[in-house]
Structures are given as structure tokens and as C-alpha cells.
Amino acid sequence: MKLQLASFAKHMCLLGVLAYLAPNAIAQAADHAQEESSSVKEIADQPSFYLWPIDAWEKWNGNEEEYKALEKDVDMALQKTKQPEELVKQLKLAAGQSRKDSKAQFKWGYAAYKLYLSKKPADKSLLNGVSWRLGLLPADTYRYARLQFLVEATKYPQRDVIKFGRILAKQNPQDAEVKYQLLSLLDPSESTKEMTESLALAKELIDLDPKRPSAHAAYAGVYWVIWEMTEKRSDAEIAIQSYKKFLELAPPDHEFRGQAERLISFIEKRLSAQ
């Protein structure tokens, strides 16, 4: 029961920051069936993200600069347009007409992901079909593999994706977004090794950007889970301190402020009752 509570607490602590509650297997299967209009034969003949050989992710030989340039182009287009949803639809149409063109798939996927990040509240339907389409082509560059991981971890957060996040984090230790998503997939209550990895990732996020509020919220979330397992006062105090640091840095309208304040109050009440 304590492990179940710890796992639930982890998601609650990171809610609105980096954690995503995974849908059940039936919902995932339904989403995949409805999102992609490809023929059965085409899907059957191509590997999906879930089955993509892990060693292929360590043989990136494509042109990284081309994909970086595509990201800049999409970012600029999203900033200029007053109808970002329409832009994403146009890119999706172009990608559908050139299914073997990895750059067309990348531009659509990247635009959809960036639009998703800008929406409040978040709308995961913007990512419908992106993960599957990206998985039909080889991840021949870090940028392509990175996008594939970020979309997959956001839309269908499953533990199977962890190994891909680890490869990316090792390849580029400065990529905070990959580390946030990787941390959201980990469960510190799963094992001592995973607890150690979660703590290390959360600390690295703070080191990468000490003034980023969500980094401190992530660190607090990991210690919440540890406290639920150990019941040590020192772990609870670190969680409180980190949540307070988040509140100090976060803007007044941050969507996680109210949750952080309630968590601090809850922990303090639990401690006072001991």
C-alpha cells in the first residue's frame, strides 16, 4: 500500500510541472486506432516506436544542423501566425502527402509539440498521430530522436520509453527538457537504483537552471516520494524547502502555485502530528 501511495504522490507532486498520468492500455489502443488513417498493410509493414531497435538510437548519422534549422523555422512561423492551429494542420497535411520524408514529419511533429506546450490547459489531442508517424521512419539524428521521445513520453507515458530517454540524456546532458520528461517517467519507489537516478536528475535540473521554478518543484516531488517511503522528517523538510523555493521563483499566476501551497500545508500538518 505504501508503494502505491508513493507512486500516486509522485504524480501529484509533479502535476502541472512535468508528470503526466498514463492512460490505461485500452485507451491507448483506441487512441492509436482513431488517430492514424494509414492502411493496415502500411502499419503492419513498418516498425512502431515501441519496437524500434534500441541500437538504432546510438547510430545517428543524419545532419543535425538541418533539423535545428527546421526547428527555428517552425518557431518563427508559430510566433508570426495568428492561427497556430491552422499552421499545424497545414504541416500535418504536407506530412501526410510525403510520408517517407522525415523532415516533413519532423516539422509537423515539432510544430504540434510546441503548440501543445503553449496551450493552457494542455490539450494532448494536438499530438494525435504524431508519435506513430515519427516512428515509421528511422531516428537518424539526435533532434529527430529527441522529438520522438518527447512526444511519446507526453502522449503515451510508459516505462518502456525510459531507455530511450536515458540514451538522449547521456548524449546531451545539457538538455533539460529531455531530463524533465525522463524524470516524469521514473518512479523512485520502484527500486533504490531508480530512486538514486530520480534524485540525480532532479538535482541536475536545478544545476542547469537554478532559477527555473519547476526544477525545484521536481526536486520536491522526488523527496515527497522518498518521505512517503522512509517517513524521515529530514526528507519531508527537504520537500517543504524545495516547494517554498518553487513558490519564491514562480510567477503569481503559475498553475502549480496552489498545489504547491496545499502540499506544503499537508506535509507540515503530518509532521506536527508525529
Image (tube, rainbow, N blue to C red):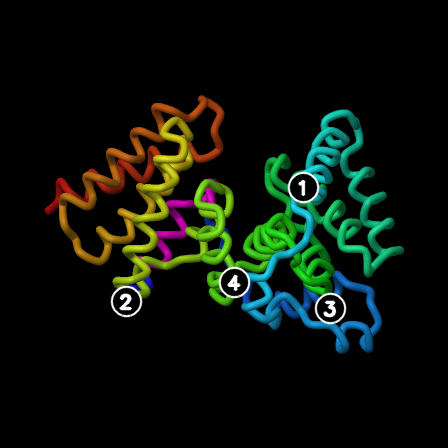
The residue nearer to you, when weighing 91 against 24, is 91
Q: CA distance from mark 3 to mark 2?
A: 35 Å
Taking the magenta stretch, the answer to whether it contains residue 43 is: no
Residue at left offset 35%, top offset 30%: 246
Between marks 3 and 1, how big is the CA–CA gap? 34 Å
Mark 1–mark 2 distance (CA, rounded to whole Å): 49 Å
What is the x, y in percent for residue 97? Answer: 89, 55
Image check: 222 left or right of 98?
left
* Mark 3 vs mark 2: in front: 3
Which contiguous range is marked in magenta? 6-18
As helix, strand or loop, the secondary structure at mark 3 comes to helix
Which residue position holds label 1? 65
Mark 2, other Cα within 10 Å: few <14 / some 14–19 / many ≥20 = few
Q: Which three-letter amino acid code belongs to the residue tagged 4?
A: Val
Q: Name the quarter where the N terminus is drawn.
A: bottom left
Question: Is residue 15 highlighted in magenta?
Answer: yes
Q: Earlier in the sequence, mark 3 or mark 4?
A: 3
Label 4: which secondary element = helix
The residue tagged 4 is 161
Which of the two residues, 9 or 177, is positioned nearer the viewer here? 177
Relative side of 90 to 222, left or right: right
Question: Which label sits on residue 113?
Answer: none
Q: Position of residue 190 (x, y in %)?
A: 32, 65
Q: Position of residue 142 (x, y in %)?
A: 59, 51
Q: Which residue is mark 2?
A: 1
Q: Residue at point 45% right, 47% down?
A: 179
In the rendered image of this protein, does residue 147 appear above or below residue 204?
A: below
User: Between marks 3 and 4, how big is the CA–CA gap?
Assistant: 20 Å
What is the distance, in whole Å, between disc 1 and disc 4 at their CAs?
25 Å
Q: Please, what secondary structure does the residue beneath circle 1 have?
A: helix
Residue on which the image places disc 3: 33
- Give the mark, 4 or 2, whose residue is nearer the N terminus: 2
